[in-house]
Image (cartoon, rainbow, N blue to C red):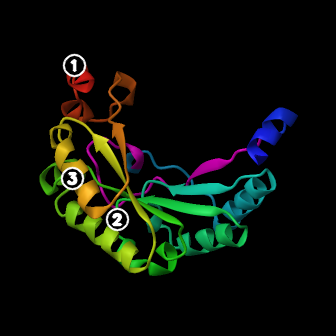
Amino acid sequence: GRLVAAQLAGRAGPFHVTLYLTKRCNLRCVYCSSPDRPTDELSTEQWCAVLDELRAHGTERVLFFGGEPLVRRDADVLVGKARELGLRTAMATNGTLVPSRPEVVRRLHTLVVSLDGSETSHDRNRGAGSYHDAMAAVEAARAWRVPVKVNAVLNANSAGDLERLLEIGRTQRLPITLNLMRSEQNGLWKNAADHRLEDERIRQ
């Protein structure tokens, strides 16, 4: 109701905001350029000021994103600040650091774990052992009573594994968001073209 009223009054604000805390990451996924395009990061104080400003403009939810947001030592401070402001909090992660960061994850409303399919297809995209890390992250979050959803990337390595991914979602009771790997030429990075789906396969 508040969103509609704000729209009608011409004072609509950002309801949901994705915050890119860092481009650093401890994995090197075949389709992602973030770790190879470093940028200066905001300080803890600067991010807290951003959260204050967003809340003042009516923001209700924030998604902490990266890179891998858990590589930031102050991730617990930033999530805590968001919670103090009354914001709903989510974090997208590759899962590798989740079991070692309970002080962050336990304060989230939702943990979003990257999972592209079976162990074979997932590790082909994200690196050996990353499937087990992702599943360990799901287990850890659930042990801490934090709701979990899955973010999956479909490309040539994982699209054939879609049924297996959906089965994981059903048996593990995990909501899944499916994303196609960007396939336009200016969206491809290094050898990412080797992992893209052809247009006809995407249609199928």
Q: Nearer the viewer, mark 3 or mark 2?
A: 3
Q: Position of residue 60 (x, y in %)?
A: 68, 55
Q: Residue at x 24, y 36 (%)?
A: 155
> Which residue position holds label 2?
95
Q: Residue at x 79, y 50 (%)?
A: 57
Disc ID at residue 167: 3
Q: Main secondary structure of the magenta part?
A: loop
Q: Amino acid at mark 1?
A: Glu
Quarter that holds the C terminus: top left
**For residue 123, what is the image quadrant?**
bottom left
Q: Alpha-carbon neighbours of circle 2 within 10 Å: few (<14), some, or many (≥20)?
A: many
Disc ID at residue 200: 1
Q: Amino acid at mark 2?
A: Gly
Of residues 8 and 36, the one drawn nearer to the viewer in this rendering? 8
- Inspect the magenta stretch and tell me whether residue 155 lies in it: no
Q: Alpha-carbon neighbours of circle 3 within 10 Å: few (<14), some, or many (≥20)?
A: some
